[in-house]
Amino acid sequence: MLQKKLGQRIAALRKKQGLTQEALAEVIGCSVEFISLVERGVNAPAVAGLQGFADALKVEVRDLFTFEAKKPK
């Protein structure tokens, strides 16, 4: 669950910055396939890799874990 939320958050931040998966992968130094796996919640960056994501997305590491609360129905 956390892995999926993290992936969705990274995807949202990437899109907000106007970056493609390719551009994010290049900045971080990983493959586009890895970015795709992370954003789909299949894989997650190592703890040491979180800083690279945060730097590329121009946020603090803690912001990667700031999830929108679901609105009650």
Image: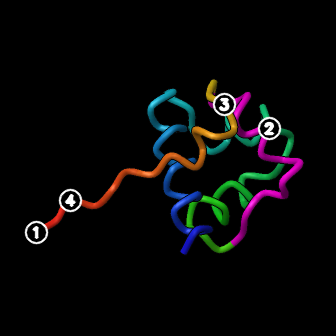
Q: Residue under label 1, please give it.
A: 73
Q: CA separation, marks 2 and 3?
A: 8 Å
Q: Residue under label 4, please give it.
A: 71
Which of pointers 2 and 4 lies earlier in the amino acid sequence?
Answer: 2
* Amino acid type for the residue under numbered disc 4: Lys
Asked if residue 21 lies in the magenta stretch, the reply is no
Q: Residue at x 84, y 58 (%)?
A: 46
Could you say where residue 32 lies in the image, as x and y percent from the top left?
A: 72, 52
Please say if 4 is above or below 15. below
* Amino acid type for the residue under numbered disc 3: Glu
The dot on residue 50 is none
- Circles 3 and 4: CB atoms closer than 8 Å: no
Q: CA separation, marks 4 and 1?
A: 6 Å
Which of pointers 1 and 2 lies earlier in the amino acid sequence?
Answer: 2
Badge 4 crowding class, 10 Å Cα cut-off, few under 14, some 14 to 19, many 20 or more, is few
> Could you say which quadrant of the image residue 36 lies in?
bottom right
- Circles 2 and 4: CB atoms closer than 8 Å: no
**Which SS does the magenta portion mostly show?**
helix
Q: Residue at x 74, y 42 (%)?
A: 25
- Circles 4 and 1: CB atoms closer than 8 Å: yes
Could you say where residue 31 lies in the image, as x and y percent from the top left?
A: 80, 52
Q: Residue under label 2, please give it.
A: 51
Task: Give the magenta part as a residue range.
Answer: 43-57
Could you say where residue 60 lies in the image, as x and y percent from the top left?
A: 66, 31
Which of pointers 2 and 3 lies earlier in the amino acid sequence?
Answer: 2
Q: Residue at x 20, y 59 (%)?
A: 71
Q: CA separation, marks 2 and 4?
A: 30 Å
Badge 2 crowding class, 10 Å Cα cut-off, few under 14, some 14 to 19, many 20 or more, is some
